[in-house]
């Protein structure tokens, strides 16, 4: 049995007539998406802070930029936890588990960053295009699965 969190791999598995379930237990899928997510935020920070510097300064600041991106992630998760609390206090998102709520908010932020990267040049733009293509294909797959009643949930 194949277990995938994202709709696109579930749709592909279904097209090969394999069983599929929705799950968060696929480590390859999590690592690929997590790596792309981190690369996107790094590319956004690079385009925002380092794009106008000479090449030698860009290389010199790659590691400090990685530390800044790590601090950004910590702050984003903290701010998101407060946003989730406020939304729940307002009566919204009460049925959504914390991990799914965090995923939703992070996806919104990273997709906004990818959209902004479309206006940059070089490798950051390619990373933004890759992210937006992946999100678009996943949404299309989710729509197709919903119409085909093929979206099954594990552990729910």
Image (cartoon, rainbow, N blue to C red):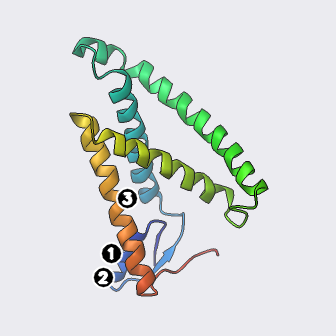
Dot 2 crowding, Cα within 10 Å, few <14, some 14–19, many 20+: few
Against 17, residue 131 (above or below) is: above
The residue under the point 37% across, 76% down is 11
The residue under the point 49% across, 24% down is 67
SS assignment at label 2: loop
Mark 1 highlights which residue? 12
Relative image position of residue 154 (x, y in whole percent): 58, 76
Horizontal side, residue 50 vs residue 38: left or right: left
Residue 16: give its label.
Answer: 2
Residue 105 appearing in the image: yes
Residue 69: give its label.
Answer: none
C-alpha span from label 2 to label 1: 7 Å
Relative image position of residue 120 (x, y in whole percent): 26, 34
C-alpha span from label 1 to label 3: 15 Å
Q: Which corner quadrant of the image does residue 114 belong to?
A: top left
Say whether disc 2 or disc 3 marks the residue closer to the N-terminus.
2
SS assignment at label 1: helix
Say whether disc 1 or disc 3 marks the residue closer to the N-terminus.
1
Mark 3 highlights which residue? 135
Relative image position of residue 37 (x, y in whole percent): 42, 45
Relative image position of residue 71 (x, y in whole percent): 56, 28
Name the front one of labels 2 and 1: 1
Q: Are marks 2 and 1 in contact (CB under 8 Å)?
A: yes
Q: Which residue sits furthest right? A: 89
Q: Which corner quadrant holds the C terminus?
A: bottom right
Horizontal side, residue 54 vs residue 112: left or right: left
């Amino acid at each position: 049995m194949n277990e995938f969190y994202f709709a696109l791999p579930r749709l592909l598995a279904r097209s090969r007539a394999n069983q599929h379930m929705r799950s968060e237990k696929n480590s390859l899928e999590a690592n690929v998406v997590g790596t792309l997510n981190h690369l996107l935020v790094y590319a956004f920070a690079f385009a925002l802070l380092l794009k106008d510097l000479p090449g030698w300064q860009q290389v010199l600041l790659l590691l400090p930029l990685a530390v800044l991106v790590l601090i950004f992630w910590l702050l984003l998760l903290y701010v998101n936890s407060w946003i989730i609390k406020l939304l729940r206090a307002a009566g919204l998102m009460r049925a959504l588990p914390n991990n799914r709520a965090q995923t939703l908010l992070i996806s919104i932020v990273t997709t906004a960053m990818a959209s902004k990267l479309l206006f940059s040049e070089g490798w950051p733009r390619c990373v933004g295009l890759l992210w937006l293509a992946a999100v678009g294909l996943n949404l299309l797959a989710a729509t197709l699965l919903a119409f085909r009643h093929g979206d099954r949930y594990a552990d729910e």
